[in-house]
Image (tube, rainbow, N blue to C red):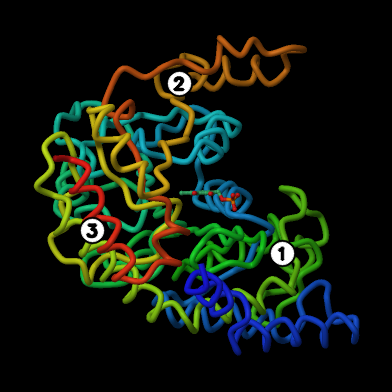
């Protein structure tokens, strides 16, 4: 109990957290809490440098960042976009709202896109959005084999769960023509609510500004773009700048956070992997993992084993709705009809999967984060003891 108290104290009342809270207080007092103050611009530039991208642009949340990026990259009505079934629901709805058609690919227990895809579907697509989920980067070889089938695919990365993970020898986010990330409060880099887009294309960056950043005047922009930004083509997507202060704090702590979590996850994998009915996604190199979100993923098809794990650990279930098996989430016209329905029948939306997602669970990330290796070790010993 006392140990736990000190771990929480360490987490919430660290020197860094107190410093960033005081900085927020200072900027609020000076009313530098709106639009694009210097500290927000310098945060964007630090993020771009860290993630190996020439441009970084903040947004009100990850969904807005994603939607704006999809438009800026040219996704339009009837465009086909490849995504894994392991894609965040509001990303899927952003695609459908634009009128584009998602082509869902299966994923396996390693959280990688399955190689059973239909080549013709890959050839028909123009876009490929990859999600590096739960800290595990996508396997570059699989992505490359898809790109080799259709070299014109425009690659977009969702790095909301994988800050600091490595993909093709670079941090995730640097491979795609554009990538985006949520900075919602539970993420490794948290602005409370926020999002960010990375791109190395000046053209995409300028377009993102005038589409979503109402009245953002930039010296780098030509006069036309500055004028266009007075319209707000996609509404208004800027972030509360104060969020940049906590997010910068998290960026500075990211390497350390990733190191600690990698060690704990490796420890859990090594010490529980010999359980029958328990499968951890295969990790070739733990150094390539990063960010992490929600939990440490595993698959389990034994109620009995789950109960044993639950007796010591907080276990949470996979919680993204299964949209890909519902025709309203495959066809943009049907999706829009659903949006305008007066009362949506829940049974028309929430279908039950009949695949590996039924066996998909997580060790709660907050618990793992707040437990040191010794505590985790003791819990594992008790789970194993329970087994006999
Ligand atoms: C993988 C992934 N992509 C996108 C989003 C959307 O981000 P936001 O909630 O900031 O809109 C989330 C949110 O949790 C997410 O987990």
**Structural crowding at the residue carrying mark 1, measured as other residues with C-alpha within 10 Å and reported as few (<14), some (14–19) or many (≥20):** many
Per the image, the residue denoted by label 3 is 268
Name which quarter of the figure residue 13 lies in: bottom right
Per the image, the residue denoted by label 1 is 239
Q: Residue 160 carries which label?
A: none
Q: In this view, does 149 lie to the left or right of 83?
A: left
Of the numbered discs 1 and 2, the one sitting upstream in the chain is 1
Q: In this view, does 262 lie to the left or right of 324?
A: left
Quadrant where the C terminus is found in the figure = top left
**Structural crowding at the residue carrying mark 2, measured as other residues with C-alpha within 10 Å and reported as few (<14), some (14–19) or many (≥20):** some
Q: Which residue occupies the foreground of this view, 84 or 7?
A: 7
Q: Where is residue 340 in the image (x, y as percent from the top left)?
A: 73, 17
Q: Is residue 298 above or below residue 26?
A: above
Kindly identify the residue that appears in the image at 29 percent across and 32 percent down: 105
Per the image, the residue denoted by label 2 is 330
Q: Position of residue 337 (x, y in %)?
A: 65, 14
Q: Give how far apart the Cα atoms at labels 1 and 2 are.
A: 31 Å
Q: Is residue 130 above or below residue 18?
A: above
Mark 2, ligand 1, within 8 Å: the answer is no
Kindly identify the residue that appears in the image at 56 percent across and 66 percent down: 205
Q: Which of the two marks, 1 or 2, is nearer to us in this view?
A: 1
Kindly identify the residue that appears in the image at 56 percent across and 28 percent down: 99
Please state the total of marks drawn on the protein image: 3
Q: Which residue occupies the foreground of this view, 311 or 183?
A: 311
């Amino acid at each position: 109990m006392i140990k736990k108290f000190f771990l929480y104290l360490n987490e919430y009342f660290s020197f860094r957290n107190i410093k960033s809270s005081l900085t927020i207080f200072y900027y609020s007092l000076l009313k530098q809490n709106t639009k694009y103050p210097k500290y927000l611009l310098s945060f964007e530039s630090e993020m771009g440098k860290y993630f190996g991208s020439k441009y970084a642009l903040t947004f009100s949340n990850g969904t807005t960042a994603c939607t704006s990026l999809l438009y800026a990259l040219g996704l339009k009505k009837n465009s086909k976009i490849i995504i894994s079934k392991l894609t965040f629901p509001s990303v899927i709805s952003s695609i459908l709202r634009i009128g584009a058609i998602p082509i869902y690919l299966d994923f396996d227990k390693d959280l990688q896109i399955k190689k059973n895809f239909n080549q013709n579907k890959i050839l028909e697509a123009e876009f490929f959005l990859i999600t590096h989920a739960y800290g595990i980067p996508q396997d570059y070889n699989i992505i490359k084999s898809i790109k080799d089938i259709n070299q014109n695919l425009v690659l977009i990365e969702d790095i909301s769960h994988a800050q600091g993970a490595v993909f093709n020898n670079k941090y995730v986010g640097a491979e795609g023509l554009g990538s985006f990330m949520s900075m919602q409060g539970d993420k490794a880099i948290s602005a409370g609510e926020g999002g960010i887009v990375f791109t190395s294309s000046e053209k995409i960056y300028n377009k993102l500004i005038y589409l979503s950043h109402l009245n953002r005047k930039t010296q780098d922009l030509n006069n036309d773009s500055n004028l266009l930004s007075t319209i707000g083509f996609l509404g208004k997507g800027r972030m509360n700048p104060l969020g940049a202060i906590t997010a910068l704090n998290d960026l500075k702590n990211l390497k350390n956070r990733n190191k600690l979590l990698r060690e704990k996850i490796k420890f859990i994998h090594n010490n529980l992997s010999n359980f029958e009915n328990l499968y951890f996604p295969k990790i070739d190199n733990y150094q390539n993992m990063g960010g992490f979100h929600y939990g440490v993923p595993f698959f389990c098809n034994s109620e009995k084993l789950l109960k044993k794990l639950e007796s010591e650990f907080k276990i949470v279930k996979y919680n993204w709705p299964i949209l890909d098996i519902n025709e309203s989430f495959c066809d943009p016209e049907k999706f829009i009809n659903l949006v305008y329905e007066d009362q949506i029948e829940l049974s028309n939306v929430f279908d039950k999967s009949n695949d590996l997602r039924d066996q998909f669970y997580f060790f709660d990330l907050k618990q793992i984060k707040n437990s040191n290796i010794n505590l985790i070790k003791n819990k594992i010993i008790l789970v194993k003891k329970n087994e006999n």
